[in-house]
Amino acid sequence: PIILSQTKFTHRDKLRYPFEERGLQFGDGVYEVIRIYKGSYYLLHEHVNRLFRSAEAIKLVLPFSKEEITNLLLDLLQRNDMTADGKVYLQSTRGSAPREHTFPEDVEANVYAYVQDLPRNHKNLENGVNVITRHDSRWDYCYIKSLNLLPNVLAKQEAKENGCFEAIFHKDGLVTECSSSNAYLVKDGKIYTHPASSSILHGCVRMRVEQFASDLSLPFIENGFSLDDIKDADEMFLSSSTAEVTPIVSVDGAKVGNGTPGKHTRKLQEAYEKDAN
Ligand code: PDD
C-alpha cells in the first residue's frame, strides 16, 4: 500500500517516526476520517475544510493549501487502485522535536494519510444498534478534531463490553453526541440534536442530515435533548462518516420507541443513500 507522508507518496512500510513525536507524546495534532464509496470520496471538500479549521484552532500550520491536499488525497486513491468502499485516515501533528510542552521552532508539521477498506455495515444499518450513556468528561473544544481521544476510547470500550455499538455522552443530563458520531432524537416528526457549538464535533454527515431533513420538510431543531427526553422518544439515530445514518434501537437496555428503526430515520437513510452514491 502507498501512503501519503508529508506531501510525498511512499510505501507504507517506509514510514518511520522518532519517538519524540508530538502526536505520540502530547496528542498534539488533528485528524480526519473521510469515507470512500466505490473508490470515490464522499464529502471530501467538507473534511478538508474541517481539517483546516481544526489546525487553525490549535495554531498548527499545515504544510499544504486546501487545493494541494485535495489533489494529494485524490492521487492517493489512484495510486492504491482504490475501487472498493473504504476510508482515508489523515493526521497532522506539530512535528518531531525534543520533548518540551511549548511549540518547537522551525519544525514542520508531520502529516500522513492512508487508505483502508471499510465495507458498509449492512446489519447495523438495517437492524439498528444499542447504545449506553456516559458522562461527557471531555474538554471545552470538542469541535476540534484533535488526536486526544482517551475519553472517547474509554466510552466506546465500555459500550463494547456492554454489547453495545456506541456510548452517548451527556453533560448534566443534556446529550452532546456519541463517542465517535453525532446523536439525534425524533419526536412527533421533529429531529432534535445538540447545537453545533464547541461541545460537539461538527460532523460532515451531520451537515448533510440537516440538509436531508430540510429536503424532507422535517424540522431540524438544534436545541439538544436530555436523557429524560429519550424515555419518550419515537426514534433515535446516530451519524458519522463510518457509520452513516444508523438507527439507535435501545439506550441503556431500554427500547427507543417500539425498539425498531423508525420511519423518519429510514427516510434519512434513503436520502443518505442517494447522496452518497
Ligand atoms: N469520528 N463526533 C465525534 C466525536 C466523532 O469522532 C465523529 C467522527 C463524528 C462524526 O463526524 P463525521 O460525520 O464528520 O464523520 C461526531 C470519526 C469517524 C472517527 O473518529 O473515526
Image (cartoon, rainbow, N blue to C red):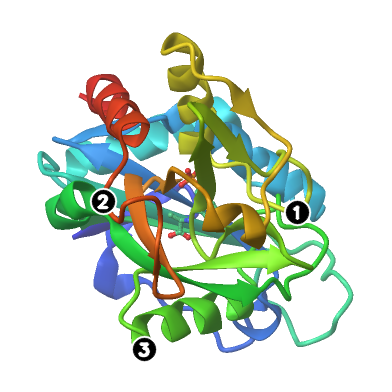
Residue count near mark 1 (Cα–Cα under 10 Å), binned few <14, some 14–19, many ≥20:
some
Q: Nearer the viewer, mark 2 or mark 3?
A: 2
Q: CA distance from mark 1 to mark 2?
A: 29 Å
In the displayed structure, 265 sits above or below 256; it is: above
In the displayed structure, 26 sits above or below 233; it is: below
Q: Which residue is mark 1?
A: 199
Residue type at the position of mark 1: Ser
Residue 161 is labelled as 3
Q: Nearer the viewer, residue 120 or 55?
A: 120
Q: Position of residue 218 (x, y in %)?
A: 49, 19
**Can I make out residue 241 in this image?**
yes
Q: Quadrant of the C terminus?
A: top left
Residue type at the position of mark 3: Glu
- N-terminal label among 2 and 3: 3
Q: Position of residue 53 (x, y in %)?
A: 71, 40
Q: Quadrant of the N terminus?
A: bottom left
Q: Which residue is mark 2?
A: 260
Q: Nearer the viewer, mark 1 or mark 3?
A: 3
Q: Position of residue 19 (x, y in %)?
A: 57, 89
In the displayed structure, 81 sits above or below 207; it is: below
Residue type at the position of mark 2: Thr
Q: CA distance from mark 2 to mark 3?
A: 22 Å
Mark 2: which secondary structure? Answer: loop
- N-terminal label among 1 and 3: 3
